[in-house]
Amino acid sequence: MMVRVRFAPSPTGFLHIGGSRTALFNWLYARSQKGEFILRIEDTDALRSKKEYLDEILTSLTWLGFRWDELYHQSERFALYREYADKLVAAGKAYRAEKLAPEESPDLQTSEAGAKAQPRGTGQAVILKVPQQKAAFDDLIRGPIEFDTAVIKDQVLIKSDGTPTYNFACVIDDALMKITHVIRGDDHISNTPKQILIYEALGLAMPQFAHLPLILAKEGGRLSKRKGATAISEFREAGYLPEALVNFLLLLGWSPGGDREIIGITEAIELFDIRKVNKTAAVLDIGKLNWINNEYLKAADPEKLADQIVPLLAGKQLIDKDNFDRNYVVSLIKLFQARMTFVGDFVERADTFFLQDVPVETKDKEKFLGKDLSKEFGLFLERLARLNNFDPPAIEAEFRALVAELNIQAKELIHPIRVALTGKTVGPGLFEVIAVLGKERTRLRLSKWIKKENG
Ligand code: GLU
């Protein structure tokens, strides 16, 4: 049987770490089983569902690379839910009642969208008679789970405004969409027996269930607005690479084995097994995400990074986006990428490479360029001018020869040259920096610190 899984977000908020981890594990399971990944938008609540949230969810899923094979909106399927509710009433398994259920939403007439999307219905809720029995299932991650349904009250299937409850719409859709595996966060585990009762009442085949472990904040406790519940779009804006974020999400409940933490998606698809997902809660550690992001930045194709970095540089007026030296940008990226945590770090660290006049802070000027180095800089430039191969080893050889000739220590010249060239006291290896700047930029930058003989 073809594996079919679904990710079923409600567009009542942005996509967060927890939701994207659920999406990933569904998508990954589908890909690993050569199955299908269905995206189902659970927008039955017209008052709380917002287009802004839906757009963010779709954009973020796309950015993360989780392509879906089919897309559904529950708001377009209300007639279907009512049809199945009517069948249950006709079979004597459900009844209509005037009484408002506690989870009933307020009068939908107050919302124009709600009034349009959700005809007011009959004014009567449809409620499932819950038999006194046990509901049991074998969770693929957590093993056998049994609930005593004596504690479950009769279940509202359709509210009096005509909208379906989450549990009812979820079951109808999972059944009609031929979902074989329901993979979701374990905050839904108490819904599962209620859903099983609905499957049984309808005589529909049940999928298998897999409840993913909770994600806890590093400070302890559940994720919240203050503790890690950041929208995926914010991670994107902060300069995380999607591959790094996906790798990080993978480790929230799964491990490729051993101490291994860096794993590409293609290999993950081969190794992933839903049955091997941890039962114990995962901990959200942004420090680890930062480490992973740096690992991916180190290994990233500089040309691809350039595509992300060019708009940032243009935004800061460091380059003219229609007229700039792309090779220079790519060479600089190669120089900096190993030490970057975020894509945006590049702009901060390499900004002066794009400026005509390199700004030097007063304290650095005093410390490193307070002494007249005209002679040293001049001799260095003469040596550099003679080089045919302007590469780091050749530049370094000239530098070493010069300090030997002047009988000074390398560091007496290394720091002043770095500050004169870049305006910074730290950075990548100086000889690499000089090679990337090239002869002409190096000459212009050092010449500024050489006093002219005749005034
Ligand atoms: N709309 C539900 C949610 O966002 C879906 C739960 C499920 O996967 O069944 O939590």
Image (cartoon, rainbow, N blue to C red):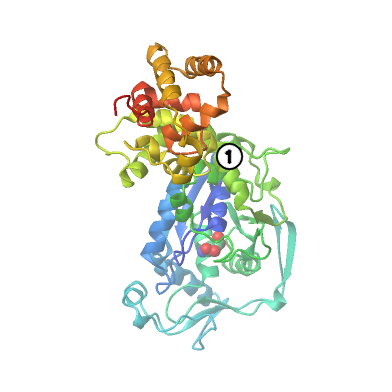
At x 55%, y 61%, the residue is: 229
- Give whichever of 215, 427 is nearer the camera: 427
Residue identified by numbered label 1: 32
Q: Is 446 situated left or right of 189 in this image?
A: left
Which residue is at 47% across, 18% downward?
Answer: 395
Tell me the quarter of the image containing the N terminus. top right
User: Relative to 250, is 428 above or below?
Assistant: above
Ligand 1, seen in the image, is in the quarter at bottom right
Give residue 261's position: percent from left, percent from top: 65, 40
Residue 257 at x, y = what percent?
71, 38
Residue found farthest to the bottom: 99
Q: Quadrant of residue 319?
A: top left
User: How many marks are shown on the rendered structure?
Assistant: 1
Q: Secondary structure at mark 1?
A: helix
Q: Nearer the viewer, residue 19 or 450?
A: 450
Quarter containing the C terminus: top left
Percent across and percent down for residue 370 are 46, 37
Left or right: 309 as drawn, with respect to 368: left
Work out whether 335 lies above or below 246: above
Residue 303 seen by the camera: yes
Give the farthest residue toward the left.
322
Residue flagged by tag 1: what amino acid is it?
Answer: Ser
Residue 283, percent from left and from top:
67, 55
Closer to the camera, 130 or 25?
Answer: 25
